[in-house]
Image (spheres, grey):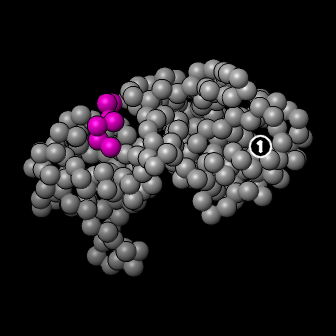
């Protein structure tokens, strides 16, 4: 990282990047980023490890600056000021295009209205939502069809296990609903299974795949199958797209990976 004539070489896993993010850090910022190869270390380049407490005393980005521009959750948390600047500099179309390339087919700047924190767990997990998001709060069946499921309750259970949940606004593109949530920075879907069968599991994961999710959070409400059967049914259906499943079963959240 270099600002004017001053240079500082930090490891990619230094906490600076998660705390302050990437430049620009302020108006007319001259900070730039340059990659360093491992072969260069010790050959004229020395990696530094300054303490974060010292860095915080000397460095603070202006409001609306910093952050990780490619972190998926950040696209939905973009501030109104950032939206205004994107329009001013004529890059709002580029922002939307890149979001679409990252898999957020329904992303649009007009949907961004800030976000709200709904729940924070002692485990470090949380549940947040875009202001226009309306997650389901109850399991409601009308005439044999589930018109609403308790997405919020399921999300809170996952947050209690340390996961970070962010609800997205509900929109549709070509008849397909956008994804429910971002879980730990992965595009995800929340599914409820009320009649636990292998067919229901298959339908849930296929639906998540169709919507573009890489993670699926499934709460199995009724316990008609053994855990061994559930585990095998889920693992058999994970693939190159849906690679991770969080299964809430009998009061425990299980993580299954491809």
Q: Name the residue under label 1.
A: 200
* Within-10-Å neighbours for mark 1: few <14, some 14–19, many 20+: some
Magenta range is 108-114
Give 51 or 221, whichever is nearer the viewer: 221
Position of residue 144 measured from the top left corner of the image (x, y, whole percent): 73, 26
Q: What element carries label 1?
A: helix
Give 164 or 94, whichever is nearer the viewer: 94
Position of residue 85 measured from the top left corner of the image (x, y, whole percent): 16, 43
Give 34 or 100, whichever is nearer the viewer: 100
- Kindly identify the residue that appears in the image at 17 percent across and 39 percent down: 84
- Kindly identify the residue that appears in the image at 55 percent across and 33 percent down: 125
Residue 1 vs 193, above or below: the answer is below
- Kindly identify the residue that appears in the image at 62 percent across and 27 percent down: 147
Position of residue 218 measured from the top left corner of the image (x, y, whole percent): 69, 39
Instruction: Decide whether residue 198 is among the magenta residues.
Output: no
| Location of the C terminus (image quadrant) | bottom right
Left or right: 164 with respect to 173?
right
Left or right: 134 with respect to 150?
left
């Amino acid at each position: 990282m270099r600002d004017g004539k001053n240079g500082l070489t930090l490891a990619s896993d230094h906490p600076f990047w998660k705390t302050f993010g990437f430049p620009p850090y302020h108006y007319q910022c001259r900070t730039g980023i340059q990659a360093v190869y491992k072969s260069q270390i010790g050959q004229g380049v020395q990696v530094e490890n300054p303490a974060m407490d010292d860095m915080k005393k000397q460095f603070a980005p202006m409001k609306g600056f910093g952050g990780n521009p490619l972190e998926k959750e950040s696209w939905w948390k973009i501030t109104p000021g950032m939206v205004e600047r994107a329009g001013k500099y004529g890059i709002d179309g580029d922002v939307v295009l890149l979001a679409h390339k990252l898999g957020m087919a329904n992303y649009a700047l007009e949907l961004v209205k800030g976000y709200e924190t709904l729940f924070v767990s002692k485990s470090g997990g949380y549940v947040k939502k875009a202001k226009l998001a309306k997650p389901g709060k109850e399991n409601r069946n009308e005439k044999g069809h589930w018109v609403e499921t308790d997405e919020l309750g399921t999300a809170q259970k996952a947050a209690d296990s340390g996961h970070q949940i962010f609800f997205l606004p509900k929109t549709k593109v070509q008849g397909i609903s956008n994804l429910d949530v971002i879980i730990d920075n992965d595009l995800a879907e929340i599914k409820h299974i009320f009649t636990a069968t292998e067919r229901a599991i298959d339908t849930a994961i296929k639906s998540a795949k169709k919507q573009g999710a890489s993670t699926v959070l499934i709460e199995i409400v009724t316990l008609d199958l053994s855990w061994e059967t559930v585990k095998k049914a889920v693992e058999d259906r994970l693939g190159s797209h849906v690679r991770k499943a969080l299964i809430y079963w009998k009061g425990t959240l299980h993580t299954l990976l491809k």
